[in-house]
Image (spheres, rainbow, N blue to C red):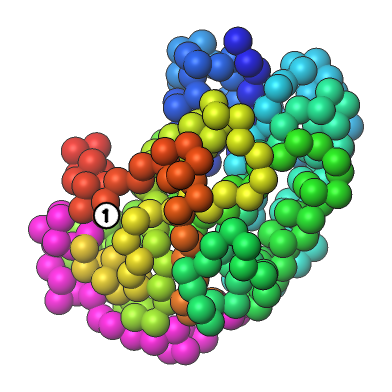
Amino acid sequence: MRKIMVSGANGLLGQKLVTALAGQFEVLATARQDALTVQVPGIRYQPLDITRQADCKQLVHGFQPDVIVNAAALTHVDACETRREECWNINVKAVENLAAAARRNMAQLVHLSTDYLFDGKQGPYDEDDTPNPIGYYGKSKLASENAVRLKGVPYAIVRTNVIYGTGEKVKNNFFLWVYNSLRAGKAIRVVTDQYNNPILAEDLAEGIRKMISASRYGIYHLAGREYLNRFDFAVAIADVFDFDKELITPILTADLNQASPRPMKGGLKIDKAISDFQFEPRSLDTALDFLKLQL
């Protein structure tokens, strides 16, 4: 049985990854916390701070994984803009640590990246489009991709965008923010000029599982099927959960005065993943119905 180590296992994607990989692989889950948030039968857990190079090397040397999946990152876009040293330590230096550790036994490094690598002028983007990040978060993720390539380990870079869903003690995501706000009868303002193709966390985890099972390498874009703006996404959530759509006010990104610039027309083309390992994300309505059953 192939061995997989997952970093960031207590985040939304990390929780879904551990669940998706269990049974088919021997999985070691890691995160900064003392314990694994979601208990999955047969999954081992060990705390790990991936910003500590020696700890990464020690754990990887002991476990000897065939694959390391890095689902840990600082993804708060404005925080990355204002706390650049912290962003670089987590999003770049920690990735260098994992890549160096992976090289000891030439484990494949599966690294999560983002559509914020692109400037958002002509999205959605495919794997061959040239990155041109406009904010520090995107710049850090591009640097992390380069760090993976330069270490000389077998790798797969998985670019994604707007991961949504629900989990145990997970930080807020767009879906949870809209859901919790509208459920409480709270009015929200949502932009109409930012376009992406959001993906359910379970679908992203399953896509990564399929990619690893098919022994695929290189760059893959994994995202949802529908390309839409954030306002329309919020309205779709309201429709499925029978919330009051009048609580959602359309605005422009410029109205928010955010610390970091955003790519307006981002998003990712997923044809390569569909062709190479039969990636099958749910439709938006089907994914929201799935979350409705969970909640």
Q: Residue at x 32, y 61 (%)?
A: 226
- Residue 259 shown in magenta: yes
Q: Residue at x 54, y 26 (%)?
A: 213
Q: How many marks?
A: 1
- Residue 211 shown in magenta: no
Q: Going by the image, does 75 lie left or right of 108?
A: left
Residue 91: image quadrant is bottom right
Q: Is residue 197 above or below residue 165?
A: below
Q: Is residue 220 above or below residue 13?
A: below
Q: As rendered, which of 257 and 111 lies closer to the eye? A: 111
Q: Going by the image, does 209 lie left or right of 62?
A: left
- Quadrant of the image containing the N terminus: top right
Per the image, the residue denoted by label 1 is: 284
Q: Is residue 40 above or below residue 290?
A: above
Amino acid type, label 1: Leu
Q: Is residue 89 above or below residue 206?
A: below
Q: Residue at x 47, y 76 (%)?
A: 265
Residue 179: image quadrant is bottom left
Q: How far from the left and from the top, in percent, is residue 96?
A: 82, 45
Range shown magenta: 237-262
Q: As rendered, which of 183 and 288 lies closer to the eye? A: 288
